[in-house]
Amino acid sequence: MLPRALRESFTGAIRRMLRPVVRQLVAWGVPYPAFDRLVRELFVEVAEDEFKLPFKRQTDSRIALVTGLNRKEIARLRRRQVATENPRPAEEAVATRVVGRWLAPPYVDRAGQPKVLFYEADRPGAVSFIRLVRALALDVPPRSVLDELIRGGLVELRVDGQVALLRQANIPEGDPATKLELLASDPAELFTTIVHNLERPDATWLQRKVVYDNIGADALPALRAAARDAGEEFMRAANRLLATNDRDRNPRAPAGRRSRVLLGAYYFEADAPQQAGDSARAPTDTTASHPRPGRRPGPGRRRSRRRATRST
């Protein structure tokens, strides 16, 4: 149990850690209800699997005690875990529903391609973007939906007031499947290492990083390439080190309980907060505003600080 004096610091750290997660959920169209349901399911699952009493059957009351969820909710979630082997798909985001509807009649042409729609039709019953959005019974104004689709690069609002679908799937460009597998494992492993070092200061694991906060943007391309080369050299050395201790590759490796060990490296960059006296100025905003939707048929220099964290 975490001491009370550290709970506020811990929750603050979790909030900061979750910020990029929440940002990506929003960017990739996963709505809050799906995240809320996922967290509730995980609380029950973790309590069920990892907080059992060795001499008692795990009960709804016990899970309620350790999670803070009410027993009725816990009973429902536990029944659902028994009833299905696969997790229920997340609720479709608004953008996903709009794109899906756009790919069906009457919003496609004879070849099955999505039509370019006027934002608002000039006659009742004619296809339009507003009609499409209203057909989905969304609790969001059509203009807000359009703005979000434009932001996500899914649609284009043309100067004549027509709306064109640019991508026929609400997923990031490229094939993210393999990288998502890493997303499922790498952050959890790093988080577990940090928690281990907090809980076991007498037996810490390797946890290092080096940070400089006044690197000019002009240096970044060369720095990225050099960092990649250094990281690849490190990974080759790490591979040799682990391979000599892996019993599948080296029968003479030390014996003992089977363990999984990894060494990793990563690179990160972000804009640093500008301070008085910095030579680099923030660029001015030159982004043009979007054209108005139309009716048919109208067009209608300081010292750089270096910080290195160490396992504690």
Image (tube, grey):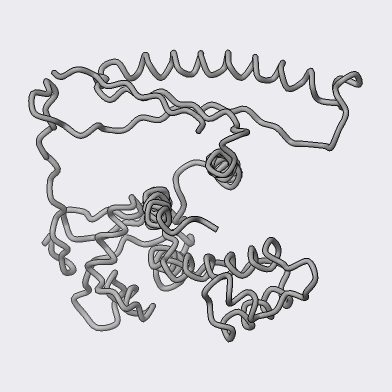
Q: Viewer-proximal residue, 116 or 230?
A: 230
Q: Residue at coordinates 57% horizontally, 67% vertically from top-left?
A: 43
Q: Quadrant of residue 50?
A: bottom right
- How far from the left and from the top, in percent, is residue 167? 41, 52
Q: Residue at coordinates 71% horizontally, 63% vertically from top-left?
A: 49
Is residue 21 toward the left or the right of residue 251 in the image?
A: left
Q: Is residue 184 above or below residue 115?
A: above
Q: Residue at coordinates 79% horizontally, 18% vertically from top-left?
A: 244
Q: Residue at coordinates 29% horizontally, 15% vertically from top-left?
A: 219
- How far from the left and from the top, in percent, is residue 134? 32, 79
Q: Quadrant of residue 215?
A: top left
Q: Residue furthest right?
A: 251
Looking at the rendering, in which quadrant would you find the N terminus?
Answer: bottom right
- How far from the left and from the top, in percent, is residue 90? 53, 67
Is residue 310 toward the left or the right of residue 188 in the image?
A: left
Q: Is residue 289 above or below residue 116?
A: above
